[in-house]
Amino acid sequence: MDALTKLLENLSLNLIVSSRKNNGEESYILIDEDFHEYKFSYKTKDGAFNWRCNKGKFQNCPGTVKIAGKQKPITVWRGHEYITTNQTKVKIIQSDMRQMASAQPDTEPRKLILECQKNEPAELCKYNLS
């Protein structure tokens, strides 16, 4: 499984680290050009990577893509049953913040937040204090 993790890290695609699995390995989410989210499903015998839709509200969404090798293009096998929202873009910003925080532990958190939000639209950068 470590070899598979290294292959996923070397892909030239829009991948974000979502969380850790129960066994301690990192879990990845693939984001396509339309901001649909996919979780890794399996690697085929011919070396292609298959990804399934990762939208929680639409658990039975048939969205599936295939990547032949380590780079684009992303081949869509089945389409989605929903329209994307800004939530995926927010996840990308949060992932960037986590990566910057781990790479620069001495930097103030507010500075990291402002750096990640610099080129983003105002509606994505609203705070929800609850």
Image: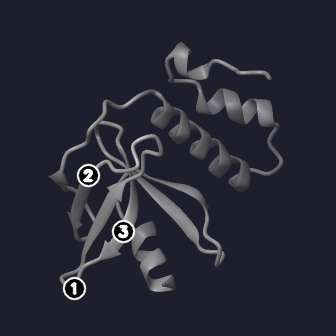
Q: Residue 55 carries which label?
A: none
- Mark 3 highlights which residue? 41
Can you tell which mark lies on residue 45?
1
Q: Which amino acid does label 2 sit on?
A: Pro
Q: Is 81 situated left or right of 8 in this image? A: left
Q: What is the CA distance from the residue labelled 2 to the residue labelled 3?
A: 13 Å
Residue 46 position (above or below residue 9): below
Q: Do the residues labelled 2 and 3 touch (CB within 8 Å)?
A: no
Q: In the picture shown, does residue 112 fall above or below 45?
A: above
Task: Tell me the crowding category of disc 1: few under 14, some 14 to 19, or many 20 or more residues within 10 angstroms, Cα based.
Answer: few
The foreground one among 38 and 4 is 38
Q: Three-letter amino acid code at disc 3?
A: Ser
Which corner quadrant of the image does residue 11 belong to?
bottom left
- Residue at point 39%, 43% (across, down): 58
What secondary structure is found at the residue carrying circle 2? Answer: loop
Q: On the image, numbered disc 2 is attached to which residue?
A: 62
